[in-house]
Amino acid sequence: MSKTVWPPLHVYALAHRCTTCGAEPGEQCNAPNKNGRLVRADRIRTEMGMDPIEHDPAHRMHATRQQAGLRHKRRDAVRAPWPEDREPGHRYDSLGDAWTPE
């Protein structure tokens, strides 16, 4: 049975306008505190001789936008056929051109 590939949460979140900072769909949130926290964490890791880590893009978004993306992803999952009834290679997300599977 083929496994359906769903877009990651941050892609669903980016498909929505951020109600906190007003970022338009496709634009990153204007979240200086969130970004600063991640930069500081990487700086501390570097000072300790560790490599910086790759951060989840959702961590740079406001919670309201993340929640909108999660609702959107859940709606798509509920509307999709059961896993055993899905067609291989067929997309069941509603993002259209906003996301292309790898």
Image (cartoon, rainbow, N blue to C red):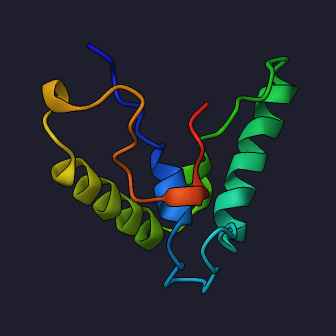
Residue 50 location (% of width, % of height)? 79, 18
Residue 2 location (% of width, % of height)? 32, 17
Residue 13 location (% of width, % of height)? 49, 62
Residue 48 location (% of width, % of height)? 81, 22
Q: Nearer the viewer, residue 77 or 84?
A: 84
Q: How many marks?
A: 0
The residue located at (56%, 52%) in the rendering is 59
Q: Nearer the viewer, residue 88 or 102?
A: 88
Q: Nearer the viewer, residue 58 or 73?
A: 73
Image quarter where the C terminus lies is: top right
Depicted 24 relative to depicted 56: above or below: below
Image quarter where the N terminus lies is: top left
The residue located at (33%, 62%) in the rendering is 72
Depicted 50 relative to depicted 26: above or below: above
Depicted 38 relative to depicted 31: above or below: above
The residue located at (81%, 21%) in the rendering is 51
> Farthest top residue?
1
Q: In the visual, does 23 lie left or right of 86?
A: right
The residue located at (16%, 51%) in the rendering is 78
Depicted 77 relative to depicted 62: above or below: above
